[in-house]
Image: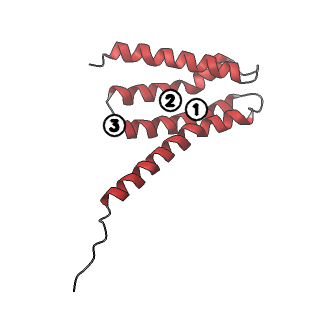
Amino acid sequence: MRHPLDIVAMFAALWLLASMMLDALTPKELTAIMIGVAIGPAVLITAVFYYLRCPRTDFAVIFAALWLISDIAIAFVSPTQLPHFLIVLGFLPALLIGTALHWQRLQRREQRLPAPSVKRG
């Protein structure tokens, strides 16, 4: 059973960890406070969908979209230009999840296709 206080503690710890890690990767002018404010709404929305027991596939797509939005928000609040690898890092979850979903779709399609049969006349 997912207790709401456990979810709050888990996502607060993830929010703090992500803020500190991004602070280490970004230019010195961008502080952990600015990053925390930029990614805070995305972490909160992700926690709500986790609490509502959103299906895994939907949760992964929501997470990737919110991560990309957070990356854009960080770029907006940054007083200097972000390094290019951080912009690529924003697109990485969406690319990985899209690739996994496409791969699953191809695997299911091969299972649904009937084997060709020889017609006897």
For mark 2, give the secondary structure.
helix
Mark 2–mark 1 CB contact (< 8 Å): yes
Q: From the viewer's side, name the closer residue of 71 and 118.
A: 118
Q: Is residue 70 above or below residue 17?
A: below
Estimate the spatial distance between the alpha carbons at disc 2 and disc 1, rounded to whole Å: 7 Å
Estimate the spatial distance between the alpha carbons at disc 1 and disc 3, rounded to whole Å: 22 Å
Q: In the drawing, does residue 97 fall left or right of residue 55?
A: right
Q: Residue at x 50, y 19 (%)?
A: 14
Q: Which mark is residue 42?
A: 2
Identify the amino acid type marked 3.
Pro
Nearer the observer: mark 2 or 3; the answer is 3
**Residue at the disc numbered 1:** 70
Q: Residue at x 57, y 21 (%)?
A: 18
**Residue at the disc numbered 3:** 55
Q: In which quadrant will I find the C terminus?
A: bottom left
Q: Is residue 91 above or below residue 78?
A: below
Identify the amino acid type marked 1.
Ser
